[in-house]
Amino acid sequence: MKTTIEIPDALMEQARRLAAREHTTLRALVEQGLREVIADKKRAAGFRLRRATFKGSGLQPPLRDAGWERIRDMSYEGRGG
């Protein structure tokens, strides 16, 4: 498919020099760049944290109103810390 895009002059010049050094075409560089950007976006959007819920009724009564420090301290009780 043919299309027209606007590219800043300095970027176009860099791309032309790179294409000449790599013995390839500007078209091939643009295609490669687009493929890499699309692949990166797919990888970045691909992660999704799974829903991890457990049966129960929440925190036990002694911890229901406890702050994070108290919960953390209790989780390390008896572990030499």
Image (cartoon, helix red, strand yellow):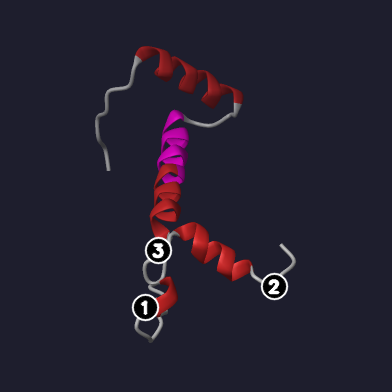
Q: Position of residue 15 (x, y in %)?
A: 47, 23
Highlighted range, magenta? 26-36
The single residue placed furthest to the front in the displayed view is 62
| Secondary structure category for the residue under label 2 | loop
Majority secondary structure in the magenta region: helix
Residue visible at 38% across and 71% down?
A: 64
Q: Residue 65 at x, y = what percent?
A: 37, 67
Q: Which residue appears at 41% of the width and 71% of the height?
A: 50
Distance from the alpha carbon under mark 3 to that under mark 1: 24 Å
Q: Please state which amino acid type lies under the numbered disc 2.
A: Gly
- Looking at the image, tell me whether mark 2 or mark 1 is earlier in sequence order: 1
Mark 2 or 1: in front is 2
Q: Is residue 74 above or below residue 60?
A: above
Identify the amino acid type marked 3. Answer: Arg
> Quarter of the image containing the C terminus?
bottom right
**In the image, residue 70 above or below residue 60:** above
Task: Please name whichever residue, 46 or 49, is drawn nearer the observer in this view of the structure.
Answer: 49
Q: Please tell me the numbered disc located at residue 48.
A: 3
Secondary structure type for disc 1: loop
* Residue 32: in magenta span: yes
Labels 3 and 1 touching (C-beta < 8 A): no
**Residue 13 falls in image quadrant:** top left
Residue at 38% across, 73% down: 51
2 or 3: tag closer to the N-terminus: 3
Can you tell which of label 2 and label 3 is closer to the viewer?
2
**Mark 2 to mark 3 CA distance (whole Å):** 35 Å
Residue 77 locus on image (x, y percent): 64, 70
- Which residue in the structure is indicated by mark 1? 58
Instruction: Using the numbered discs, state the Cα–Cα distance from disc 2 to disc 1 in whole angstroms.
Output: 23 Å
Q: Which mark is residue 78?
A: 2
